[in-house]
Amino acid sequence: MTQAELRLCSLLLQEHFGEIVEKVGNSLLRTGPRPLRLLVGDTGLLPDQVKKALCVLIQHNLVRYEVQPRGSVEYEARSQRILRILRYPRYIYTAKTLYGDPGELLVEELLLHGHLPMSCAVARVANRLTETMEDGKTMDYTEVSSTFVRLADTHFIQRCPTVPESPRDTKAPPPPAPALAIAEKDMYTVPRLSLHGKGKRRHSCDEDEEREHKAKKQKQEGGNSETPPDDGIYWQVNLERFHQHFRDQALVSAVASRMDQTSSEVVRTMLRMSEVTTASGASHTQPLSSNEIFRALPAGYNIGKQVLDQYLALLADDPLEFVGKSGDSGGGTYSVNLHKALVSLATATLESIVEERFGSRCARIFRLLLRKKHLEQKQVEDFAMIPAKEAKDMLYRMLSENLVSLQEIPKTPDHAPSRTFYLYTVNVMAAARMLLHRCYKSVANLMERRQHEMRENKRLLEKSQRVEAILASMQATGAEAAQLHEVEEMITGPERQQLENLKRNVNKIDASENQVDETIFVLESFIESTMKR
Amino acid sequence: MAELKVKPEVPDPMDIESRIIELCHQFPHGITDQVIQNDMPHMEAQQRAVAINRLLSMGQLDLLRSSAGLLYRIKDSQNASKMKGSDNQEKLVYQIIEDAGNKGIWSRDIRYKSNLPLTEINKILKNLESKKLIKAVKSVAASKKKVYMLYNLQPDRSVTGGAWYSDQDFESEFVEVLNQQCFKFLQSKAEAARDSKQNPMIQRNSSFASSHEVWKYICELGISKVELSMEDIETILNTLIYDGKVEMTIIAAKEGTVGSVDGQMRLYRAVSPLIQPTGLVRTPCGLCPVFDDCHEGGEISPSNCIYMTEWLEF
């Protein structure tokens, strides 16, 4: 847990959950797993508050608990999971592109609530969709629940672990904290529910509808008193699956830019076929025969079998080595080399960072060192064809930033500098970790700046909110256009301009936070994949 | 009876020398002692030695050692005239420098080989330089080092640095221009292949260019005053690989096809970058020079970062 990670986690907790949860989370992050008593003592808050904060954190999977052998329960904060909060917009956007509006809202609801039973989720989403639809139309539950089922089938959402069914032994006292478990096969099975109904609007002006709603409401209240049919079955978002999807996306776009569109489609097909069959940390996908790939190509692409074979052969021969040929049965079996792909993407990221920060000549030296591993200064100058003085300057700058390191090879037992070889080298893992740390700090800086901007303009924001509230109430009571105009005039021209600026700046900072998060994703996946091998 | 003493004819010393010189002219590669003896059998060894020594000291004969023994060779008359004014030490130094060929030799090495003190060496070198017999060439590796070689010899590539150096200066603009030209050539080739819209194998193969093709193109462009070899072009293409703009494959080619070296051929192809500039560098923090000093509440903090203020105003 580096300093930058800690700072980012506490900023995220504060922004999304408030001060108390932030304090509790902070304390847990800094000091590691501890029981409730110590936690209360550390944070100086009331035990009730701490309990509620812990509830919130556990509900969102940000804290986990463990029963220690001595009988106490220890709580541990999961820093990795807290950092994922940054990525929520990307998850929601992906769900939108894949499954449309119902999918987007379902994922959003699940992310914001942590755990939700299916019936609850479907009801909420239907209500929200109905509000955005035109007057008179409502969203049917069946469409939403079918999207839900599709999300579960492709493993984007999964069931939460539940209390295992154990024979209730009344003599033994129940454990202080239940150990939750779920069988692998149950994780994605959707319970058979017959959800009927339509979405409701929160408030509507139509009188007829109101009466209708009143009648429905009574019926519904009668229905609400009984427990929903899927009580106890809670669903959460499967982040790993989303990460797999992001990785596939990055791979496909890299292939598209390096080769051509059709090759990227072939790779996309291969990845889609191995979505559910490949474990999340695997370094290769399962081998797929070219016949299978041909059958699974999307309908729009009518390329012949031979052409597909040629594309596969080209992909396998390419220096990128994303696709490897593993056999000849079935017309040639091919698999995607995921680890190599992540390594290439991560090195491309490193190279691009060096290029933007130091210039393209430095990037040339950096790539040269990546290829040749260890080089003397003279050799660097010769290979890169850069004059000696400039090459020296660039190497020293990169050395001071720790992107490049020196390896000493002494010729004599006393490491006399005049008789030692000094070789420059790039340590990719170390550089990746260092840049990841820098990313975390950058995101934290951006968030602070955004909060600062909001604070600076607090007075103005409050004023505009008041004006809007007045306008809304006046419209509801049917005021004249002249009066509305007067109220609008309360915000002067420059203030309006300032508000515009503020909105634009906040949006810009938000967007760049997401962009830095993309870099974080690539670097983290690379580090994780290398550590697993 | 008076004893007849056959007085051995004392051949004229001058005759001996001229005879030896004639023999040397007959055999320009050098004559051994044996040959002289065969020619003038009545000569005594001592007389022969005296004659030969005189010729050597006059600088008309060269003494060489070969597997058969000692060889005497006529010295080039032009050279012989040059060295007339010099003494033995200078001749020795000159010989050492001549032996070094076109790589030249450093003054310290001359000292080792000739065992002469440093001051003498320096005097002799200055002398020889003024007589325009040797010249000093600055080495490109260590700019303070001077190597000496014969006046009319062309310095070797390793000393001057080859095609990329002109007068000890690395020509970076020249390299840059070549770089861009090669890249443009490969890029246009790749685009032509992409537009041809044939099946992918042919498309890819036609987007490759061998190093020989690139070399021919650059030679025809005529932007280089110096003659460039294929290795030079390959070093330029390697820099393009390190720029990430070009990729290379090696294929096995038949001996005899144009451009193949040892049965292999190098093919180059222009490629586009793998990813767009990454997210981190799109924010001010990614490129900030004072990143490490920035923390909340300090002189430099996100709240008052001037880079961010400028960036937000775009």
Image (spheres, rainbow, N blue to C red):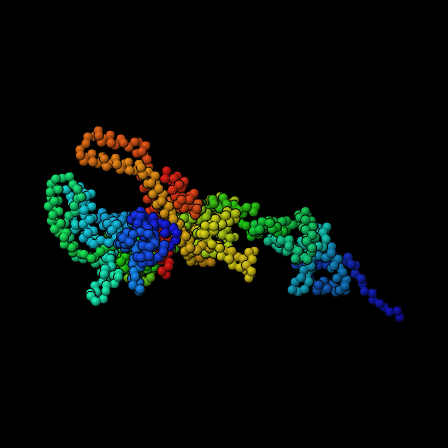
Q: Compare residues A293 and A465 and report the one nearer the observer.
A: A465
Kindly give the residue lying farthest to the right in the view shown. B1
From the top left corner, tell me how far across and down residue A86 is, in percent. 32, 49
Quarter that holds the N terminus of chain A: bottom left
Quarter that holds the C terminus of chain A: bottom left
Residue at horizontal 45 percent and vertical 56 percent from the top: A373
From the top left corner, tell me how far across and down residue B298 is, in percent. 42, 44
Q: Is residue A250 left or right of residue B13?
A: left
Residue at horizontal 16 percent and vertical 55 percent from the top: A227
Count of numbered labels shown in the rendering? 0
Q: Is residue B44 above or below residue A39?
A: below
Q: Compare residues B257 and A521 and report the one nearer the observer.
A: A521
Q: In this view, does A212 lie to the left or right of A450?
A: left
From the top left corner, tell me how far across and down residue B224 is, in percent. 50, 45
Residue at horizontal 77 percent and vertical 62 percent from the top: B47
Q: Compare residues B125 and A437 and report the one nearer the observer.
A: A437
From the top left corner, tell me how far across and down residue A426 is, in percent. 45, 54
Residue at horizontal 14 percent and vertical 54 percent from the top: A226
Kindly give the residue lying farthest to the top in the view shown. A482
Say if residue A256 shows up in the picture.
Answer: no
